[in-house]
Amino acid sequence: MSGPFISLVMRDLKLASRSGGSAALALAFFALVATLVPLGVGANLNLLARIAGGVLWVGAVLAALLSLDRLYQGDFDDGSLDLIALSPLSLEQVALAKLLAHWFSTGLPLTLLSPLLALLFGLPGPGTWALFVSLLIGTPAVSAVGAIGASLTLSLKRGGLILPLIILPLLAPAVIFGAGAVTAALDHLSNGALGLLSAFAAAAVLLSPFAAAACVRLNLAG
Amino acid sequence: MFRYANPAVFMRLSGALLPWISGAAAILLAMGLWMGFRVPPDYQQGMTVTIMFVHVPAAIVAEVAYGAIAVASLFSLVWRHPLADTAARAAAPLGAVFTALGLVTGSLWGRPMWGAYWVWDARLTSFLLLLFLYLGYMALWNAIEDETRAARAAAILALVGAVNLPIIKFSVDWWNTLHQGESIVSGQIARVFMWPLAFMAFGYMALFAALWMVRIRTEIVNRRARSLIQRAG
């Protein structure tokens, strides 16, 4: 399984990074959201440091959401998904490969960018570290839950509009635990948020390929 | 369970049951309201305690309805039960309305008691998220044209939501809690308040059951009409 699996991951990464891919766009979106918030709430660095965890987490979730349609939609439209389904990989493995590729091209870059944005928000060192770690742990869950939504809305002409409505309520725990970890670090407390976030991410990554494969199967059957 | 999968059998059975359930709902709600208006004022909440009689049952039914959707979706996905899709789809708007009712009555109670229509309390927030789950579920049903495909996609979403709902509840509880704790099962609630609440709760349940049945029956009749039109055309 390793050969086709890795080549599928590499293929998706290539598609994401070349022209028309949305990996860079998601990063730009993330940075722009982080720029607009201080314009809205004022330049008080104390206030900004306080809300940085929540704002950057919400921004990261929205940015990851933007690139979800790439996950299956393109392959479905041009027929490659039918060919991928014929490959030796099971659809569950395909879903896992696509999830990994989505995280490498979206979640990981967002995480790497976050310390820079945290700097703009005046987030102190421990807070920045907590934000970085929580995004590193939590963004796979965002990709995993997002993959379910992307595969559900696969056959829709305008799936992009309904996708956030389906996905965002399900991602509430990730935002709560992720931003909670940053707040706790600011207050020099330990509230176990990172542990809970890890549990949520592990469950999401583990279960998502099965749900996503079921959705892909039903959309290919028609 | 599968004997009632046949729409004709279901129509006959539900047709016989419906008047009784509707009647029970009307009587229970009338009794509950009458008793609810006669309770003494609570020593802390005053007369706003009566809001509880329309608020708590709505919240219970809102959760029961999501459970019903999840069970129906499981039946539809695993056993291809032909009525389960219809049942799940029919329950969603009802659940959404009861969720909204719970939120509205809760905020009306919150204004005099907490001093604000809305506070970011754990239970309020998780109910708001539940409302969004309902809306997303309904939107997915409406967005996919092919009916069997829509049914299966919605069923998968309902099950994903059912797995995630306890996690959402836990995370929101962890995040913030202001809502008073549960007092019904643990027996802390006073007798005078218990009786009207019980009547209202069963009344709401019966109302939900009756409306749900009507919606399923309507859908079956609609489907029949569509196939007749198709055959004629």
Image: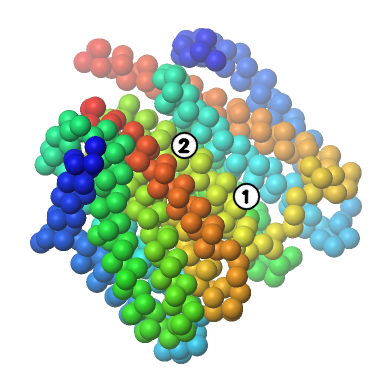
Q: Looking at the picture, which amino acid does disc 1 mark?
A: Gly
- The image quadrant that residue B148 belongs to is top left
Pointer 1 or 2: first along the chain? 1
Label placed on residue B177: none
Evaluate whether label 1 is on the same chain as label 2.
yes
Q: Looking at the picture, which amino acid does disc 2 mark?
A: Leu
Residue B230 image point, x, y percent: 25, 17
For residue A56, side relative to residue A113 (left or right): right
SS label for mark 1: helix
Q: Residue at x 74, y 46 (%)?
A: B53
Q: Is residue A146 above or below residue B195?
A: below
Q: Residues within 10 Å of mark 1 (few under 14, many from 20)?
A: many
Foreground residue, A145 or A200? A200
Q: Residue at x 49, y 52 (%)?
A: A200
Q: Is residue B101 above or below residue A53?
A: above
Residue identified by numbered label 1 = B102
Residue B52 image point, x, y percent: 74, 50
For residue A3, side relative to residue B22 (left or right): left
Label placed on residue B159: 2
Residue B135 image point, x, y percent: 44, 46
Foreground residue, A26 or A118? A118
Q: Residue at x 41, y 54 (%)?
A: A141
Q: Is residue A52 above or below residue B41?
A: below
Q: Is residue A123 visible?
A: yes
What is the spatial separation of the Cα atoms under label 1 and label 2, in whole angstroms? 23 Å
Image quarter in which the C terminus of chain A is found: top left
Q: Is residue A156 visible?
A: no
Q: Chain of mark 1?
A: B
SS label for mark 2: helix
Residue most toward the bottom? A44
